Amino acid sequence: VFLNSSILSLPTDLNITKTKVAEDPAKKYAVGDLVTFKIEINNLGPIDDEVVMVRDVLPAGLSYVSSTSSVASSPYDAANGLWILDELKVGEVQTLTINARATMAGYIVNTATVAGSTVDENLTNNKSDADLCVVLSDAGQIQGPVAVCAGSTNTYNIKQIAGATYTWTVPSDWVITA
């Protein structure tokens, strides 16, 4: 219980949990894969909270695709990374699902936080992380003729992978034209 300027206010305890939605929690994602995150917020009480804000700005390496909110009137604002609910009653649980595309290889940590309009004495459960490992996609094998004749022109190619750099090494008497 807090007394401030003759106003009595009771604290509440908001809780947030963020997870990856995957059959295998240790799954490695490839560049270009779709990653789904599930954010659950709940009010542990003892009072209802008004204007509850979840902040989840997608980090570098993830690109927003879509989202679904359990509260139809409170969509996720991907441009600002905000999900705002008008109210969260004691015991109530609301869910936000975010779909993102992995755009670069590396270890990525995605963090979500929750805050409300009332005092929250327990801030240890107001932040939650979900991490993932993103690897480069398999490019497959170089495509082109195995045997070549002197003076002939041949084309070789390989599947392009976003975020990958290619270095071609050829015999010294060959010429790369494109």
Image (cartoon, grey):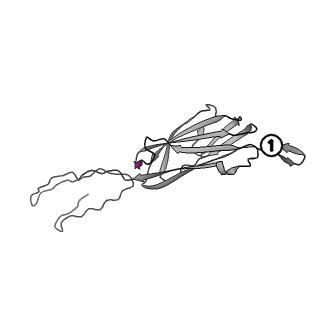
Span colored in magenta = 22-29
User: What SS does tag 1 mark?
Assistant: loop
Rendered location of residue 54, percent (x, y): 64, 44
Name the residue: 59% across, 37% down: 95
Vertical position of residue 104 compared to residue 90: above or below: below
Q: Given the image, on which type of amino acid does mark 1 rest? A: Leu
Q: Residue furthest bottom?
A: 172
Does 41 sit left or right of 13 as displayed?
Answer: left
Residue 71 highlighted magenta (yes or no): no
Quadrant where the N terminus is found in the figure: top right
Image quadrant assignment for residue 87:
top right
Vertical position of residue 41 compared to residue 174: above or below: above
Numbered label tally: 1
Disc 1 residue crowd, few under 14, some 14–19, many 20+, Cα 10 Å: some
* Residue picked out by circle 1: 10
Q: Residue furthest left?
A: 149
Name the residue: 41% across, 49% down: 28
Name the residue: 57% across, 49% down: 57
Rendered location of residue 72, percent (x, y): 61, 31
Residue 44 vs residue 34, the one in the foreground: 44
Rendered location of residue 143, percent (x, y): 21, 51
Quadrant where the C terminus is found in the figure: bottom left
Vertical position of residue 159 compared to residue 96: above or below: below
Residue 173 vs residue 128, the one in the foreground: 128
Chief SS of the magenta region: loop
Residue 78 vs residue 35, the one in the foreground: 35
Residue 75 vs residue 175, the one in the foreground: 75
Name the residue: 52% across, 53% down: 109
Q: Residue furthest right?
A: 6
